[in-house]
């Protein structure tokens, strides 16, 4: 009897060990995107995750958890179990900007999250409603100086790249524009199309179609060089020296997520980004594919935090 009991105990231990050693992922993976459907990060996440699902044999559940400039969704991941089943498709605001913009955050973007890979950098376009009598960045600056406080610019929330782009333009040119923060990126774009907002910086994939139809007038792009998706738009920095703003998006996980999981996600995402059809889709949407290592992404994030801390201080930008 004692032999039988011992044998059962050994068998039980082996079964438990086998279960715990199941290769990851053994169930669906939740990907939190702290931005609304139709946004640039949402587009990129939905472009990449079907390929990951195919490779892993598990579905991805994309959760667009918006609010507080992306802080709510980011905090949810920071506090999630570090088992690889809740990942973050991060945006620039909560990771690179909000630590300087907000008096306090419920998470630490460096200590509470593990970088996996930077997926892409995406420039913003500077656009105006056609009713604004300007056709270039220089004309916009001159018009704003002649009409201080008259122009309204929108953003999808304090600390987002559109917000900081406008604030940097104000700092570098001395113009005065009124910030109108929105909770909905879609409503912000709709109001700009309708003329309730005169000036808008926004992710190129979102506003480029409206520029091509003439519903909005494109004045410039916020990257340092022209982009193949909008070759007629010059860099804003050509008219305003020192101006460059690029949004960036990538994969992150809760801190202390097993290195094997982080490395697997990194390796598979980088392979997908390198696929010709994926690269082409990204490039046509003005997204510059990256795919760096977790260590390189960590260095990049730290540099961005320092950069945006300076901009926030110089501009006096604050949460509204």
Image: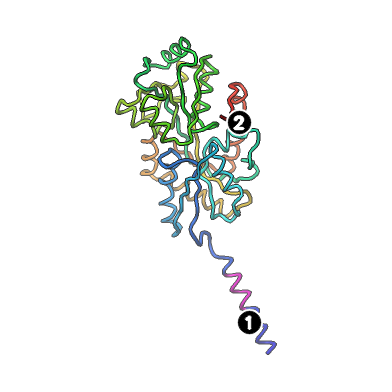
Please give the range of residues in magenta. Answer: 11-18
Image coords of residue 65 (percent x, y)? 50, 45
Q: Secondary structure at mark 2?
A: helix
Q: Residue at x 54, y 65 (%)?
A: 22
Place residue 59 in its image quadrant: bottom left
Numbered label attached to residue 101: 2
Q: Residue furthest front?
A: 196
Picture coordinates of residue 145, whole percent (x, y) = 48, 11
Which residue is pictured at 59% across the width and 45% down the height?
A: 75
**Disc 2 and disc 1: Cα gap in Å?**
59 Å
Outermost right residue: 2
**Residue 76 drawn at (x, y percent):** 57, 47
Check the image and report above or below for 271 versus 144.
below
Quarter containing the N terminus: bottom right
Residue sitting nearer the eye, 199 or 260: 199
Element type at mark 1: helix
């Amino acid at each position: 009897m004692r032999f039988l009991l011992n044998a059962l105990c050994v068998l039980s231990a082996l079964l438990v060990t086998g279960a715990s050693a199941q290769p990851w992922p053994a169930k669906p993976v939740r990907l939190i995107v702290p931005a609304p459907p139709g946004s640039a990060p949402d587009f990129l996440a939905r472009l990449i995750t079907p390929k990951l699902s195919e490779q892993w044999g598990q579905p991805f559940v994309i959760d667009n958890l918006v609010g507080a400039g992306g802080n709510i969704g980011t905090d949810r991941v920071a506090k999630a179990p570090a088992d690889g089943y809740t990942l973050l498709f991060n945006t620039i605001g909560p990771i690179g900007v909000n630590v300087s913009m907000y008096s306090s955050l419920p998470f630490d973007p460096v200590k509470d999250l593990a970088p996996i890979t930077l997926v892409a950098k995406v420039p913003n376009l500077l656009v105006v409603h056609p009713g604004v009598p300007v056709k270039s960045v220089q004309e916009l600056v001159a018009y704003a100086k002649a009409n201080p406080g008259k122009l309204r610019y929108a953003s999808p929330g304090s600390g987002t790249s559109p917000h900081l782009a406008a604030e940097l333009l104000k700092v570098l040119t001395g113009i005065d524009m009124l910030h109108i923060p929105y909770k909905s990126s879609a409503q912000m774009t709709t109001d700009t199309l309708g003329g309730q907002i005169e000036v808008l910086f926004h992710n190129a994939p979102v506003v480029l179609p409206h520029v091509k139809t003439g519903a909005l007038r494109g004045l410039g792009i916020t990257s340092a060089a022209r982009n193949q998706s909008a070759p007629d738009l010059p860099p804003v920095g050509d008219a305003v020296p020192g101006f460059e703003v690029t949004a960036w998006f990538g994969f992150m996980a809760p801190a202390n997520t097993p290195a094997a999981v982080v490395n697997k996600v990194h390796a598979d995402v980088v392979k997908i980004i390198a696929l010709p059809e994926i690269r082409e889709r990204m490039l046509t949407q003005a997204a510059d594919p990256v795919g760096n290592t977790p260590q390189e992404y960590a260095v990049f994030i730290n540099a961005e935090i320092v950069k945006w801390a300076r901009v926030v201080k110089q501009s006096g930008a604050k949460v509204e």
